[in-house]
């Protein structure tokens, strides 16, 4: 490729490329959203007659179940037969919430400990800082001290 074949990328072309990218991104997001909604609808539909019998055999009330329940029941059956992918799926499905709950509990405990430390620090009278005159200097009350230092530093 030579430099002669290259088209300069101006502000206008960058703006147009960004606009096209934004439009394409929006279409993709909408398509994914629509697919998710369609899948949720399919999962929530009632179980067909053939599968109702399978759920009854597992001890699940088919009147209370939907396709999502059927899908999970099938995964459970496969896991019980030793299917490692089904076992991993069920493990992941059930431990994510447990892991999140554990993380939340740890964060709550950390926050509780920090609040206790802050409260103890506030109650402790030894935390008083000795006045070094800094605030007075900021308020302009120690101008003479600053002027004295400026005069002696010229020597």
Image: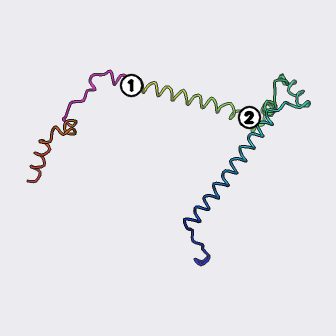
Which quadrant of the figure has residue 77?
top right
Label 2: state its secondary structure.
Answer: helix
8 relative to 99, above or below: below
| Residue situated in front as seen by the camera: 148 or 90 | 148
> Which label's residue is closer to the chain start, 2 or 1?
2
Q: Quadrant of the N terminus?
A: bottom right
Which quadrant of the figure has residue 23?
bottom right
Residue under numbered circle 2: 87
The picture places residue 65, in percent across and down from the top left corner, at 81, 26
The circle on residue 117 is 1
Residue 84 lies within the magenta run = no
The picture places residue 75, in percent across and down from the top left corner, at 78, 34
- Which residue lies at the image location 85% right of the left edge and 26% below the top edge? 55
- 121 with respect to 146 (left or right): right
| Part of the protein shown in magenta | 116-133
- 24 with respect to 113 (left or right): right
Magenta span dominant secondary structure: helix
């Amino acid at each position: 490729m030579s430099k002669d074949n290259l088209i300069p990328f101006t502000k206008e072309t960058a703006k147009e490329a960004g606009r096209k990218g934004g439009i394409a991104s929006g279409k993709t997001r909408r398509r994914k959203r629509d697919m998710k909604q369609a899948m949720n609808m399919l999962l929530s539909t009632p179980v067909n007659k053939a599968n109702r019998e399978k759920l009854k055999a597992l001890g699940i009330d088919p009147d209370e179940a939907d396709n999502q329940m059927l899908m999970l029941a099938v995964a459970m059956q496969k896991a019980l037969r030793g299917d490692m992918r089904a076992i991993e799926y069920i493990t992941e499905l059930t431990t994510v919430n447990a892991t999140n709950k554990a993380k939340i509990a740890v964060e709550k405990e950390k926050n509780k400990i920090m609040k206790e430390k802050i409260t103890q620090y506030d109650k402790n009278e030894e935390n008083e800082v000795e006045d070094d005159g800094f605030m007075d200097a900021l308020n302009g009350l120690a101008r003479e001290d600053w002027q004295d230092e400026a005069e002696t530093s010229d020597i």
